[in-house]
Image (spheres, helix red, strand yellow):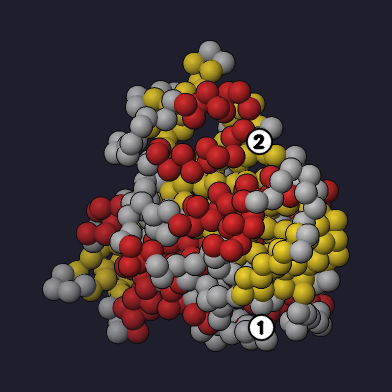
Amino acid sequence: MEDTLVYNYQRPSSLIKKDASEELFLSKYSEIQKNTDAPCFFWGDVSQPFILARCLITLSNIVKSSFNLSPFQMALLKDPIVTAGNERLRFEGFSHCAGVYARVDVLPEGLHGEFLENGTTNVDFNQPMITALGSIRPNEKIMLSVGEKEVGLYKEEEKVVERKVPLPVKWIKGLSTVQIYLSESEKLHTFNKIQTQQLFRGIPKGPVKSDYYLIIRGNKPMFSPVKSVDAVCIGGLNRLRLLEPLLPYIDQMQVFPHADMQSTTWQLYMGNIRFSFSLSRESWRGFSGEGAVLDSLIDDISDEWIDALDKYAYANQSFNPSAFAVEENISLNTTDNLTGRLAAMGLLGYDLDDHGFFYRRLPFKLNRIIGLNPRMKNAEKLIAEGKVEILNKSLARTEARVEGTGVHHTVIIDNDKERCTCEWFSKYQGERGPCKHVLAVKKVVCLKA
């Protein structure tokens, strides 16, 4: 049975003041019934089984890779998240260190079967499944089943079924952050098969400790240790080698850098199958610790709104913030906040080609969100202990003092610029999300609004 939607905050959001249109929205989507007991989400075959098998093996290799974890830590993490919805199948996973995110999308034209219900599960691809995938021949017919508790592969007389396993906490945190980064990324380059293969031949052998840059010289893409105009910064360049097994089968590759170069996404196109591959800023930085969703957790949102938004996204199988704002007559600032909240709760992924979020309900308890974000939890503790003092407040600027351990920190929020005198801010300069002191001040200001 799907977990009940529960959220720690009980106070309605100060940003959402119900008017007639919002009351209509709440009543309309509160009536939607979700089938949470469907044993099977999808049953059918795929038009490119050989390519899908190669993609799933690559995804499994990514999940088994690590760039900063010990073997013991690696043994604690599992395999792909599988979503059936909107007439497509999606397989998602992280490297063990959560610094590499990958997703396989099988598009509607590549599936021949029946979607009985929309849903998501998390399974572990063990050796029998990998062996079965590796034995698939071109044009061989296979059948797939995706259910709430298992994923099955059927070929000739052979059947391999993988059961549902717990979703790693590190993945839950990383999935929320990476979707926000994807939504802030734009396509910069498109390379054909030959250009892509030539580009990958230029990856240096062995680990790469310094940043490299994707640059264009003439009509030729290449990796360079020297930065130039319009270059795409890539940390941990050697991680791209995980894509090499797929290069013989691609039609083209597109590159989507994040607006602030906090990630890069490399999307491979193979007929009716897409393979998305996102790298964190450096190999030692996992997406799970970036804090991209923390700002969206500042404002309180009632359970009623979360439940209605969950059902809205479920009914549409997508969530376009701009279209939602126009359709429901809600401000863009509010919808941006809601989008971040839904992503943090594991209810949204992002599709680069569609320029919009898709719905997928991760199998975990939603009331754990605050516990998964210790900076927000610590910010709330600072507020509860009365350690936040607003010194000056105007429309554009806020200055505050926050008590720390044996020291007072000064926080200044000037329009969209945030500064704090703490060690965290000094080290990261806001690149990994706001510190607990900035979060506490912003939440206090919001509560007083």
Question: Residue 239's quadrant in the figure?
Answer: top left
Q: Is residue 246 left or right of residue 411?
A: right
* Residue drawn where x is 30% and y is 82% of the image: 386
Give the image location of residue 40, x and y in percent: 77, 74
Q: Which residue is mark 1?
A: 2
Q: Residues within 10 Å of mark 2 (few under 14, many from 20)?
A: some
Q: Closer to the camera, 50 or 280? A: 50
Q: Provide the secondary structure element on which disc 1 rests.
A: loop
- Give the residue type at disc 2: Tyr
Q: Is residue 140 above or below residue 298?
A: above
Q: Is residue 409 above or below residue 282?
A: below
* Residue drawn where x is 76% and y is 64% of the image: 157
Question: Residue 12's quadrant in the figure?
Answer: bottom right
* Residue drawn where x is 23% and y is 61% of the image: 422
Q: Is residue 401 left or right of residue 96?
A: left
Q: Which residue is mark 2?
A: 249
Q: Closer to the camera, 213 or 25? A: 213
* Residue drawn where x is 40% and y is 39% of the image: 238
